[in-house]
Image (cartoon, rainbow, N blue to C red):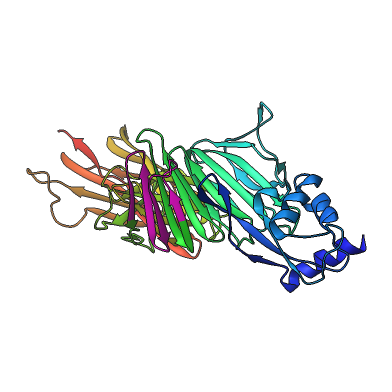
Amino acid sequence: MNRNRMIIVGLTAALLTASPSFAQTGSAPAAVETLDYVVRPGDTLIDLATAYLNRPSDYRRVQRDNRVANPRRLPIGRTLTIPVSLLRADPDYARIAGFRGAVTLSEGGRAAPPVQGQTLAENAILTTGANAFVRLALSDGSHVVVPSNSRVRLSRLRRYALNGAVDHALTVEAGRAESRVTPRRRPGGFVVRTPVSVSAVRGTDFRVAYNDDADRSATEVIEGVVEVDSGDGLSEAVAVADQGVSTSLTDTRLLPLLPAPALTQPDEVQSGPVVDFALAPLSGAAGYRGRLATDAGMIDAFAEADSAPNQPRLPFGPLTDGAYFLRLSALSPEGLEGRATTYSFIRARNGVGGLTSGSESRDNRRFYRFRWEAEGEGEARFRFQLSREDAEGRAEGPPLVDQPGVVEQAFTLSDLPPGVYTWRVQGTRHRFGRLLQVWSEPQQLRIGR
């Protein structure tokens, strides 16, 4: 008990360092990954093997490699070189830190929606539908986001008994995974696999995507360094921040990431029937991607959209009024997602629809009734305009009627002379500290003799 306590405390005092060694297999030397262990008071090879190696009998390999005469007597302070392959890695866990939308968790052949805070074991599979997201918290503080339309397997969740180093691996079977990985101690690591690539890191911020149709993976590095292998060992690339690797069965390409795109009107209130963002075209971009969230860190993301090819526009559909955040990025022709930028925006529906007009006669006079419907939340006021058209369908000078401050969703006129008229309504609201104004589509009214 005391010896184990001393080992745990001693880890902070540099008991482990990296040390490569070699083992002979036939005539060619093969590299063996090893770890150096500094002997503490009370250590024996047999006790160390029982506590930290795969099998108690593995002490014999360590004894032979380090030429230890007596496995029960070790000089304090001596450095032992231990093959990593002998180190016992116990099961570790991941936790559901948050999710939204249609998310399915498959474990042990059973599929069900996840539960907030639920603990996941190795080989659990997470599948997300459209506009669905799940965020995983790993045991060392790392986080993984599985965005919409993705399927990710937790293929390895282990923790080395010797020093607590965690070793995690994900497999992106479809879609994407975004990882922010805390620095890892050896022999731990973090690997993301796809059917055509392996991306390995010890601490960084990166994304991995797999396009099943094109049989191509994309690895994008935001911070740190990522080593990408083609999976068959025939090609590899090392990407640093602002670089990406596009990998297929036939080639591996290291490319710069595209810069973040920009909105054409960043201060515009999203007041239309659907949320729709116009972007400034970015040179080299084949498409654009946007993600919506209720927080700037995109932790509580709830919608995602890709533009049509080469179209700098991102439509998202209807959205409840409120304050939101938009993360924008551009997509290269190779499928690499570039640098992202985040905008805050206000969604406040303000529209005028359902425009109709009719007439009736009373007391030898003809009355014209114009009606509309307010679209949005909160009190609205209206401005009614009616103009006469000339023979070419253009307005004849200023409006014949221009009435602001209308409270009702209707307006009545009488005794209009024959002709062709155009009328429209402006809706005005104060929402989220902003003055919102929008005009309806113009409507035509024809009055005969």
Q: Position of residue 321 (x, y in %)?
A: 51, 51
Seen in the picture, residue 448 relative to 52 is either above or below; the reply is above
Q: Position of residue 90 (x, y in %)?
A: 74, 46
| Magenta stretch encompasses residue 229 | yes
Q: Position of residue 206 (x, y in %)?
A: 48, 56
Q: Is residue 193 left or right of residue 401?
A: right
Q: Residue at x 64, y 36 (%)?
A: 123
Observer-nearest of 242 and 368: 242
Observer-nearest of 207 and 224: 224
Q: Main secondary structure of the magenta part?
A: strand
Which part of the image, by quadrant, shows the N terminus?
Answer: bottom right
Outermost residue to the left: 391
Seen in the picture, residue 102 relative to 282 is either above or below; the reply is above
Judge whether residue 300 can be spotted in this image: no
Residue 166: which quarter of the image? bottom right
Residue 220: which quarter of the image? bottom left
Observer-nearest of 449 and 331: 331
Judge whether residue 52 can be spotted in this image: yes
Q: Residue at x 51, y 59 (%)?
A: 205
Outermost residue to the right: 1
Q: Is residue 353 left or right of residue 163?
A: left
Q: Is residue 319 left or right of residue 75?
A: left
Q: Position of residue 440 (x, y in %)?
A: 32, 47
Which part of the image, by quadrant, shows the C terminus?
Answer: top left
Which residue range is magenta in the image?
A: 227-254
| Magenta stretch encompasses residue 28 | no
Q: Residue at x 24, y 58 (%)?
A: 283
Observer-nearest of 180 and 225: 225
